[in-house]
Amino acid sequence: MKLILIRHGETEGNARGIYQGSLDLSLNRQGETQCLEIKEKLREFNIDKVFSSPLKRAVESAEVIFKLDIDEDKNLIRKKNYPPIIKIEEFKEINFGLWEGKCYKQISSEFKDHYESFLSDYKAFVFPQGESFKEFYSRVASGLQDIRDVCKDEETVAIVAHGGTLKVILCELLGLGENGFYSFNVYHGCYSFLSLYGNTVVVERINK
């Protein structure tokens, strides 16, 4: 199976530097532009299936990338043929609880003890009135396995989701587990491309 991992385009929350998590924000203009750029980058691929987080910023990104096209006059038009966008609940971003809608400075000030606990051991941390890291990692890994179970070896599959979600997927595929979560970043307006051969995973491109 060929797997393309796409982080959603930018939102106003991203631009402001807040923890979004389960907040359901739409793309901003920069995010839409990023998705149009990804569309061009992906023209070389024949994509069979598209999976997305159900949050707006991911679904809107998937729709721009896979449902729309640009005509000769540079107008956006709807494609006649495109793969359906299948929403996967397990691919939502982590629920940051009371941290959502706040920036780093607010969190480190208002939740000082919690923040220090997070820095000392993120794997054991439970976000106040939110999810634990372990719960988040487990549900994303479960969603990934469901996709691998239903997709054929010869198919090219795209996943449009969030930075945290895609990092879990990469950790699972590369055998890094929870310890590898902060080993790399996943950027807006970029995609990663992996080839899966049974238990062997080849990273063809990352953050392109």
Image (cartoon, grey):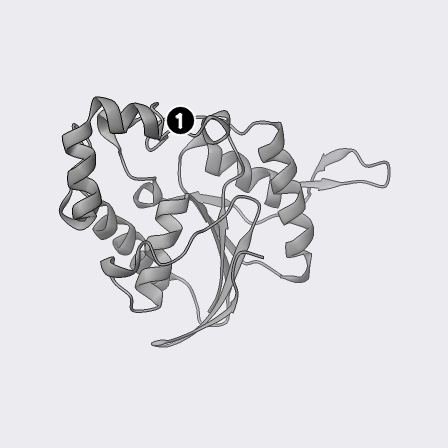
Q: Amino acid at mark 1?
A: Asp
- 102 versus 182 height, above or below: above
- 194 versus 184 height, above or below: below
Q: Residue furthest right?
A: 73
Which quadrant is the C terminus positioned in?
Answer: bottom right
**Residue 107 location (% of width, % of height):** 27, 27
**Residue 165 location (% of width, % of height):** 36, 48
**Residue 99 location (% of width, % of height):** 27, 27
Report the residue marked by disc 1. 24
131 on left or right of 54: left
Q: How many marks?
A: 1
Residue at 43% across, 30% down:
17
Tag 1's secondary structure? loop
Nearest the viewer among 63 and 101 is 101
Residue at 61% across, 44% down:
65
Residue at 19% across, 26% down:
111
- 86 versus 33 height, above or below: below
Q: Give the quarter of the image for residue 126.
A: top left
Residue at 24% across, 45% down:
136
Q: Give the quarter of the image for residue 199.
A: bottom left
Q: Give the quarter of the image for residue 30.
A: top right
124 on left or right of 188: left
**Residue 153 location (% of width, % of height):** 45, 72
Nearest the viewer among 126 and 35 is 126
One can see residue 96 in this view: yes
Q: Residues within 10 Å of mark 1 (few under 14, many from 20)?
A: few
One can see residue 131 in this view: no
169 on left or right of 154: left
Nearest the viewer among 175 and 51 is 175
